[in-house]
Image (cartoon, rainbow, N blue to C red):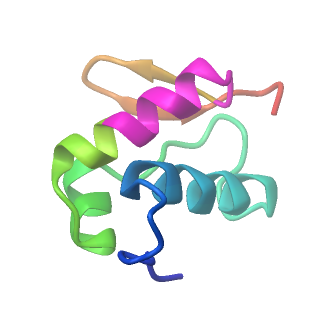
Amino acid sequence: MALERESGLPLWRQVHGILLKEINGGVYRPGERLPSESSLSRRFRVARHTIRRALRSLQEAGVVRTERGRGSIIRDEV
């Protein structure tokens, strides 16, 4: 799924939405780690700061938990 750079919707919000759809669709399961920030940055062709913002938003929504040195992990309660 590609980002719509001319849509006016912030890129981090688009990344958030795509990852949330993938999590809810079973691409990533509870307890599983999301790809690294640098991997997601390459996938979406955005700066790592954009990925960090999207991941922080997923964390604030209770979808993932972030562990230093391990990355973002899907919460069991999703």
Compared with 35, 30 (above or below) is above
Q: Is residue 3 magenta?
A: no
Q: Is residue 55 magenta?
A: yes
- Quick check: 68 left or right of 58? left
Residue nearest the observer in this picture, 54 or 69: 54
Compared with 67, 9 (above or below) is below
Direction bottom: furthest residue:
2
Coordinates of residue 26 in the picture (x, y in percent): 77, 60
**Quarter of the rendering occupied by the C terminus:** top right
**Secondary structure mainly formed by the magenta segment:** helix
Magenta-highlighted residues: 53-63
The total number of labels drawn is 0
Residue nearest the observer in this picture, 63 or 14: 14
- Quick check: 24 left or right of 64? right
Residue at the (36%, 75%) spot, across then down:
5
Compared with 71, 28 (above or below) is below
Residue at the (19%, 54%) spot, across then down:
38
- Quick check: 33 left or right of 27? left
Coordinates of residue 32 in the picture (x, y in percent): 59, 43
Compared with 32, 23 (above or below) is below
Coordinates of residue 59 in the picture (x, y in percent): 54, 24
Residue at the (24%, 60%) spot, across then down:
41
Residue at the (30%, 37%) spot, across then down:
52
